[in-house]
Structure formats: structure tokens, C-alpha cells
Image (cartoon, rainbow, N blue to C red):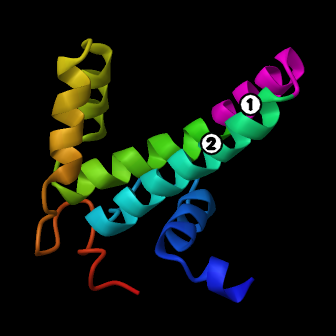
Amino acid sequence: MDKVLNLPFVNAWLKMLANFSDFKGRTSREDFWWAVLGNVIIMAVLGFILGLLGSFGNVILTLISLVLAVPAIAMWVRRLHDTNKSALYLLFALIPLVGCILLLVFAAQAGNEDDNQYGPNPKYVG
């Protein structure tokens, strides 16, 4: 069990859940992408298992998705802060296709090496 808990995507995913209400500060690119991978893996496994239950499983999966939406949005906000962008940039997601691609480009960018208006560089903070 200790080997599973020491996987990078598990640590990042748990950190995402622990900071579910933190819309301030910054998230490193590494933690962001590991948490995204953790979300994809966990939702794929849950989707397969709960899909076997039929429509009841779909309702449960939808509820889980809604619960995980808040930590994911908070993580996106912190990731944008790391690249010195406002949380309002998340509104680009409302633009079909182009907005989502633009947000992915922003998330893939390296964060500011120095402190910015949103806090210290998360690479150098415990």
C-alpha cells in the first residue's frame, strides 16, 4: 500500500483534494499535470466499475464528478496564478474548442521563476 501512496499522481491528486478550497497561491506545473493524470485514472476506473451498475452507477459517477469539480477548478486557478494570469482566464473555457486549447497552452507554460503577485514559486516552497 505504501508503494501506491508514493506514486507521484497519487500524491498530487491527494494534494489537490487537500487544497480544495484554496483559490489563492500557486500550483506547480508538475503537480498540476500529475493531478490531472490522477483524475483521469480514477474517473476511468470508477466509470468502468460504476458503469456496470447501469443508470444508478451513472448517477453516482455524476455526483462524484461534481464533488471533484471544486478541487479541480481551484487547482486550475492556482495553475493560472503560477503563470501570472488571473482566474478570469478560466472563462476562456466557455469558448468552444479554442478556449480549451488556449487554457491547455497556459497550463503547459512554465511558471514564473520568481515570486509573483499570487505568491512564492511552488517549486521552492515545501
In the image, is 109 to the left or to the right of 67? left
The reply to whether the C-beta atoms of the residues labelled 2 and 1 are less than 8 Å apart is: yes
Query: Residue 63 in the image: x percent, y percent?
Result: 75, 29
Q: Quadrant of residue 3?
A: bottom right
Magenta highlight: main SS: helix
Query: Residue 12 in the image: x percent, y percent?
Result: 49, 67
Q: Quadrant of residue 111?
A: bottom left
Looking at the rendered image, the quarter that the N terminus falls into is: bottom right
Q: Which residue is located at x 42 percent, y 62 percent? A: 34
Report the residue marked by disc 2. 43
87 shown above or below 8: above
Report the residue marked by disc 1. 61
Q: CA distance from mark 2 to mark 1?
A: 8 Å
Q: Nearer the viewer, residue 11 or 42?
A: 42
> Which residues, given as a range, are shown in magenta?
53-66
What residue type is disc 2 on? Answer: Met
Query: Residue 41 in the image: x percent, y percent?
Result: 56, 51
Q: Residue furthest top?
A: 96
Q: Which residue is located at x 55 percent, y 73 percent? A: 11
What residue type is disc 1 on? Answer: Leu
In the image, is 13 to the left or to the right of 89? right
Give whichever of discs 2 and 1 has the lower sequence position: 2
123 shown above or below 37: below
Q: Which residue is located at x 47 percent, y 58 percent? A: 35
Q: Tell me if mark 2 has few (under 14), some (14-19) or many (20+) residues whose alpha carbon lies within 10 angstroms of its own.
A: some
In the image, is 80 to the left or to the right of 71? left
